[in-house]
Amino acid sequence: MIALQKRPTPSRTLSLATPLIAVLITMIMGGLLFTVLGKNPFEAIRTIFWDPVFGEFAFYYRPQLLVKAAPLVLIAIGLSLGFKAGIWNIGAEGQYIIGAICGAGVGLAFYPTESRLIFPLMILAGAVGGWAWAMIPAILKTRFGTNEILVSLMLVYVAEQLLASMSLGLLRNPEGMGFPGSRNFSDFPAGSSWINEAAGLHWGMAFAFIAVIFAYILLNRHILGFNIRLTGDSPHAARFAGVNPTRLILFCLGTSGALAGLAGLFEVTGPSGQINIDFASGYGFTAIIVAFLGRLHPVGILLAALLMALTYVGGDLAQGNLGLPSAAIQVFQGMLLFFLLALDLLTNYRVVLKKKGAA
Amino acid sequence: MTTPLLSIKGLTKAYPGVVANDDVSFDIGQSEVHALLGENGAGKSTLVKMIYGLVKPDSGTMTWQGKSFTPADPKTARASGVAMVFQHFSLFDALKVSENVALGMENPPPMRDLARKIRRVSETYGLPLDPNRIVGDLSAGERQRVEIIRCLLQDPKLLIMDEPTSVLTPQEVDILFKTLNKLRDEGTSILYISHKLEEIRKLCDHATILRLGKNVGECVPAETSARDMAELMVGDTLQTPTRSTEKTGDVVLDVSGLTLEPTSPFGTTLKNIHFTVSAGEILGIGGVAGNGQDELLSALSGESLTWPDAVKVKGQDVANLGPNARRERGILCAPEERLGHAAAPDMSLTENALLTGAIRENLTNNGFVNWASTNDFAKSIIERFDVRTPGTHVAARALSGGNLQKFVIGREVLQRPEVLVVNQPTWGVDAAAAAAIRQALLDLAAEGAAIVVISQDLDELMEISDRFGALNEGRLSDIRPAAGLTVDEIGLMMGGAHGMEVAHVGDEEKEGAEA
């Protein structure tokens, strides 16, 4: 008989090892999945995990990894603060969209003015947009006790509708001959987030690094970070320690919203280029996987985002070269989260094999 | 000699790192009230769990009326005639009494029959209970009656009661004892678990004493002095706490007209509470659990804010200040629930030292935590209060109850409080640790702190408090000097018998005499 026994202290080794084990199991199960689809599993895994980094065309794919990882890091860092405190912002995708709309809107209002001040102003607008969208579930939760999971998730769909309306209405390119979508920021240097497009560097990466460092210091050195962790461990003890739950909810949701908004702004003014109906690409949801895969730890999130970016880039590659369906890649990402959460049990419990009858 | 109802031989049960029961043997006779006596952690609970089929013994045998008895689960144990009233009730607050009783039965009869049965049993045994009331509205004593009636409906041959009096006032205890005596006279055996010696001397025919999992002695309680039993139980002569000074200073804590709605649905409303505590004084607040103890602590700690001027410290109003602002003014608290309120279970002792120590120990600078001095603070708590732990990195949940309690109390005492409020400071703590904690409280008072001790252990309160009051349904009784209070007076302050009826045994005798 297999039984679970609670550990007196959570295992540190396993806490660090489970993401690696989860990745390994996902590769094996993913390989089986690809076999069933009639593909050579080893070739598929190599195409996804090896070719983008070390393959023949790695020089092209490596910058792609950074481009994909930057928004994931930004969003996941914000989410991890709330997740640590037991505040579940599931609507980062919506905050990402609104941040992009607000930032792009401010930028396009100045078109075609050239000024160094425009881009900082857009960054501010992006952050404020995401923050404001996250304040809706935050205020509803603190005032009326609504569930932030539901409210933030529902607001994603509202944001998607708003995005469509913006692409077709207010922000539509007046010179776009009636096609949906805003002006492209590649035609507007003052509002572009690219630092060096050829090397795949944009301001989002700089902000992602700053966010990682900021979150690390906050969580490990600052009393606010301690209060966040304390609230997650024991809300009752946090109250006793003098933590104001309302302020903590506003801070966590606000910060994650602002960071998601920033991610949206850097994306729309760089890799994506324009506000359009299909702008939302699921980074806000994938970042949830990234946050957990990275153990809600800032450095872990950085590594997890790179891995997740790899599955995106490698997935595209596999789609092109091997004809794998794009849904298979999503299943692959889902499996990763699934195995990770399942294996998480092992940090707090140990598996004991018992002989039957002895009990 | 007749065959005993239950005979236990060489029962042993080991858990990783601890032997809970080591070769325990004793007999429970027919129609006998048998006491199982021992400190917290002596192995009493494990032993009765084996009898009730919740835990399987590693070795040893049990014989039930001459036949081998190996209950695989509580259902089989109940079928044989074993019933158990747990210390912590397993009742649903939102359901009616009859519904709660039905939930514990294998084949519950229709609700109307069941209600009639409950009425009949409750009247026969002097445990009045309306089957249609919602359990959430019942007092602790009434909830216990629900549990007892649930057991009695099974016609048990052996009724196990785990620390039944910890939630009762002295008057309610008297009534319970009459009920138990009546049950015994009708042929039911009772296994009575307690660490309260006087109760056992009053009620029990026979006692088995456990220490560290071993049977260390048996006696007839009525013929043995409480002191002898205590020494068997503890295995050592205990140090009684000593107080060095008797003088008190100016009023430090002044609570007047404190009224507070509870935050949880079945909490207690505090109603117009008045008291003062002076420097160097210990105020003991007794009362049955669930009469407003937690609410009073949260009103004093600042977790619940109250009307202006309801709580004053040295003349300054603190009623609308949160926990940290009160800590700045020297009001420190140690709540009852160690894990999950006083300490965060998964955090290290260092982090738990920061939990309340940040303000008064200057552990932060512009919000940045000084982990080195926090760790030093945790270390000094561990050293000064003899907390047994491998180090400060250990998670709070890995500590035993007594060690964690010493850490929690020590954390507040070392911060030099001007007012210290503690709730159940020695609950579930072994005798040596309890004595150390009480001594620390007395020493702190001698240094001039004003101390409020909320506790359900009346012996503890009588031992350390200068003045005494009791909480009953959210009201605080008049505060009286602790010296010279009799058990009866204390009982009345705690709410007397809460309208409980005495078992009808006495009435029948009277009727018999008249006829």
Image (cartoon, coloured by chain):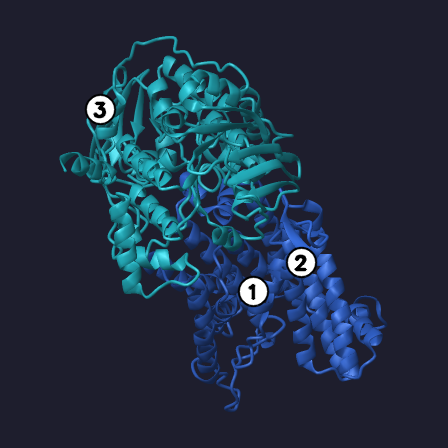
Chain colours: A blue, B cyan
Residue at 59% x, 27% y: name it. Answer: B388
Q: Residue furthest bottom?
A: A177
Residue at image position (67%, 46%) is A11
Nearer to us of marks 3 and 2 is: 3
Q: Say whether mark 1 and mark 3 are on the same chain.
A: no
Q: Residue furthest left?
A: B514
Secondary element at tag 2: helix
Q: CA distance from mark 3 to mark 1?
A: 63 Å
The residue under label 1 is which amino acid type? Answer: Ala
Above or below for B90 versus B449: below
Answer yes or no: are tags 1 and 2 on the same subunit: yes
Q: Which residue is mark 1?
A: A263
Residue position for label 3 = B479
Q: Can residue B314 be seen in the rendering of this structure? A: no
Please tell me whether mark 3 or mark 1 is closer to you in this view: 3
- Same subunit, labels 3 and 2: the answer reads no
Residue B260 position, x and y percent, is 24, 42
Residue at image point 44% right, 45% down:
B157
Q: Earlier in the sequence, mark 1 or mark 2?
A: 1
Label 3 crowd (10 A; few <14 / some 14-19 / many >=20): some
Q: Quadrant of the N terminus of chain A?
A: bottom right
Residue B295 locus on image (x, y percent): 31, 39
Judging depth in this view, the residue of B466 and B448 nearest the camera is: B466
> For this view, does B314 lie left or right of residue A228?
left
Residue closest to the eye, A78 or B176: B176
Residue A144: x %, y % from top left: 32, 60
Residue B116 image offset from top left, x and y in percent: 26, 58
Q: In what element is the residue under mark 1?
A: helix
Q: Mark 2 sits on what residue?
A: A343
Quadrant in the rendering for residue A327: bottom right
Mark 3 belongs to which subunit?
Answer: B
**Which amino acid is tagged 3?**
Ile
